[in-house]
Amino acid sequence: MHKVTLIPGDGIGPEVVMSAKKIIVSAGVSIDWDIQEAGMAVFEKHGTPLPQRVIDSIKDNKVALKGPLTTPVGEGFRSVNVTLRKELDLYANLRPIKTYPGVPSRYDNIDIVIARENTEDLYIGIEHMVGEDAAESIKVFTRKGCQRIIRYAFDYARKEGRKKVTAVHKANIMKYTDGMFLSIARDISKEYCDIEFEEMIIDAMCMKLVQSPETYDVLVLPNLYGDIVSDLCAGLIGGLGFAPGANIGSRYAVFEAVHGSAPDIAGKNTANPTAMILSAIHMLKYLGELHAAKSIEKALSKALKEAGVLTADIGGEATTSDFTDYIISMLD
Ligand code: NAI
């Protein structure tokens, strides 16, 4: 039996996480779930959004399925997500972006995987005021940090039989930080002669992703660009409801959707659980539960072609529970 930490999270988190859990249980996978509360609710009760027991639980179990956690904008505590990624050294944030038949979107043949650096860049959160009228934020890249995410992207491409890795940067302006990222990408690419290497400045990348997204395969990006480009790519395939993610380190892995806690629709049973279900499918593959992963994938793709069970974000009228129950009824 596997042991997995389950963090329901804030906003729509409990709705989408419980949908994924119910489907996994119905697919017959035996998991001992260690449910851990984190985020706003815990902060209000215990004065911290990330109690030590949550981190200890992930360290013990090695794997977590996590709902989104709210971070107050411009004030209050630091992002729990950023802290968790740093604390567990989850250096690779993998975000597959794919079009699914039945889901309305502007394109029909996108299959991109984003490998976003997850522990450095401006997200280290070192900021200060300089007098009253200026502020500074420090952007940190290390050789080790760049090397491991770039190598991860190339290894992933090779393992998954993918053809091309595009390194995204702004080295024309930031010659030390992005410059180091680019020069390491160029060096490492020489060790992977079977995979095409391409480099792209971040602003041009955004335009090209909108114009011809089908020409991209694996993208490797520093933290901030990876964060922004992930949402852009989610928009290409039907929205945030369809973008799953995995935070991977050498010892631990935390699976979560790209989207946030969506306070505007929380508690209404209308959230689209697809991104969380896809994240759970990746978790099952990571745990070696390939049969269940395949069976859920098949049931999910049948559900997405069934207009009557789609959620409001893609023009349907079904609830989160209707969609979940339909997937369960389609399991082998
Ligand atoms: P958001 O992703 O929560 O919502 C953006 C828009 O997409 C909203 O209109 C929302 O209703 C819609 N949306 C998102 N997921 C959806 C789903 N599954 N089904 C249907 N519609 C969906 O982004 P926002 O509003 O910027 O962030 C809200 C909070 O979430 C913030 O506190 C932010 O810090 C946090 N956040 C947490 C993340 C995490 O825990 N990994 C990731 C991103 C944001």
Image (cartoon, helix red, strand yellow):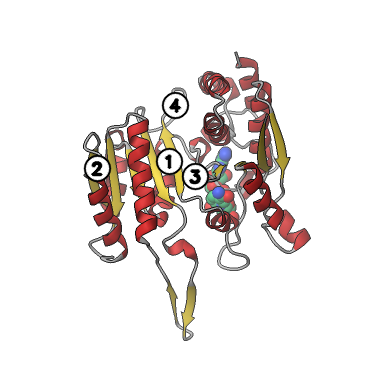
Q: Residue at 38% across / 57% down in the picture?
A: 144
Tag 3 or tag 4, which sits nearer the N-term?
4
Q: Is residue 45 left or right of residue 242?
A: right
Check the image and report above or below for 211 versus 324: below
Disc 4 secondary structure class = loop
Q: Is residue 258 above or below residue 71?
A: above
Q: Is mark 3 on a helix, strand or loop?
A: strand
Q: Name the residue under label 3.
A: 248
User: As shown in the figure, which amino acid type bears the numbered disc 2?
Assistant: Glu
* Alpha carbon separation for disc pair 3 and 1: 24 Å
- Front: mark 2 or 1: 2
Residue 235 against residue 303 in the figure, above or below: below
Residue drawn at (49%, 44%), measured in percent from left and top? 248
| Mark 4 C-beta closer than 8 Å to ligand 1 | no
The residue under the point 29% across, 48% down is 167
* Mark 3 vs 1, N-terminal side: 1
Disc 3 marks which amino acid? Ile
The x, y position of residue 56, in whole percent, is 67, 51
Kindly indicate the quadrant of the structure image that contains residue 134: bottom left
Dot 1: element: helix
Residue hosting label 2: 191
In this rendered view, identify the residue nearer to me: 116 or 324. 116
Q: Would you say the residues marked 2 and 4 are in contact, meaning their CB atoms lie under 8 Å apart? A: no
Residue highlighted by disc 4: 100
Q: Which of marks 2 and 3 is nearer the N terminus?
A: 2
Q: Determine crowd level at label 2: few under 14, some 14-19, many 20+ residues with C-alpha closer than 10 A.
A: few
> Which of the two labelled residues, at mark 4 and mark 1, occupies the earlier sequence position?
4
